[in-house]
Amino acid sequence: MPAKKKAITKKTTKKKAVKTKAVKKAAVKKTPVKKKAVPKKVAKVVKKTVKKVVKKTVKKIVKKIVTPKAPKIKKIVAPQEFKAGENIVYPTHGVGRILTIEKFQYDLVEEQLYVIQFFQDKLTIRVPFAKAKLIGLRNITSKPSMTRTLSILKQKPKIKKAMWSRRAQEYDQKINSGDIKQLSEVVRDLFRKDDQTEQSYSERQMFQVAFERYTREFAISSDLKFEEASSKILEILNKR
């Protein structure tokens, strides 16, 4: 009788071992299901935000291109005091002629200019209408006024006892003043006859500039050629 009881106990232990194996397999299957659900939701949110940003940038660019402001050109209005073909006097260059009148535009500003050619310097410059008075641009001296300046040439030279550098500065101011009376005074004071003492190079150069400017204006006002006007003025200077 005791031998039969031992056999029964061995069978029961085997059945318990099989049950534990089944529990382990069920636990392994549940873990991968939870991991797959998370990345799908994140990807959808990213796609939506990208689309919104693209639409906004396109709208802003279109607005900037559609509304440009055209620049306004400012016109400087000034009276026209001289005509094309007219002779004038520019203080620092002497007698010149207005070749034409033209419009000029710079930095959104438009104004009219005198195009002037000078006989003495063989130079062409442009003067805006608005700056003509400020520069001292003037008409040729009338014939009666020009004739009165000849009396200044008949006078004896008035030379100051100051140093030449100071006198040269005064003469230069008179030459470039644009005043025909002051110009005639320089011609009177710097003229030297052949039998008189020699002048320095700077004195001769200054006399030549003053003499040529005065003679050109005298020729135009008296309706003479330059050579005729020059010989007439030299005759007056040599007789004093």
Image: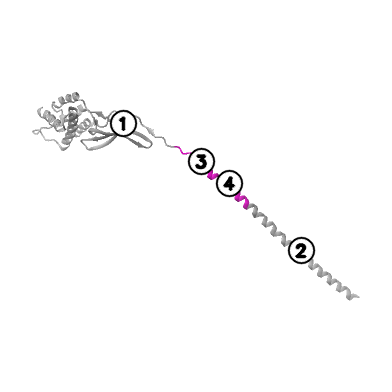
Task: Give, as a three-letter code, the residue at label 1.
Answer: Phe
Amino acid type, residue under disc 2 in the picture: Val
Left or right of 47, for residue 161: left
Q: Position of residue 88 (x, y in %)?
A: 24, 30
Mark 3 residue crowding within 10 angstroms, few (<14) / some (14–19) / many (20+) = few
Quickly name the residue at label 3.
Answer: 63
Q: Which mark is residue 23?
A: 2
In this view of the protein, which residue sits in the foreground, 103 or 109? 103
Q: Residue 62: tell me if it is visible.
A: yes
Q: Give how far apart the Cα atoms at labels 3 and 2 are.
A: 68 Å
User: What SS does tag 1 mark?
Assistant: helix
Q: Furthest residue to the right?
A: 1
Q: Quadrant of residue 91?
A: top left
The Cα atoms of the two marked residues, 1 and 3, are separated by 43 Å
Q: Measured from the top left, where is residue 14 in percent x and y?
A: 81, 70
The mark nearer the N terminus, 2 or 4, is: 2
Q: Is residue 196 above or below residue 34?
A: above
Name the one closer to the observer, 70 or 4. 70
Q: Is residue 206 magenta?
A: no
Q: Which residues are magenta?
A: 43-69
Earlier in the chain: of badge 3 and badge 2, it is 2
Residue highlighted by disc 4: 52
Q: Earlier in the sequence, mark 4 or mark 3?
A: 4
The residue depicted at 74 percent of the width and 64 percent of the height is 25
Locate residue 237: give its quadrant.
Answer: top left
In screen coordinates, is 113 left or right of 152? right
Above or below, 52 relative to 29: above
Q: Which residue is mark 1?
A: 129
Mark 1 is surrounded, within 10 Å at the Cα level, by few (under 14), some (14 to 19) or many (20 or more) other residues, namely many
In whole angstroms, how far apart are the C-alphas of marks 1 and 4? 60 Å
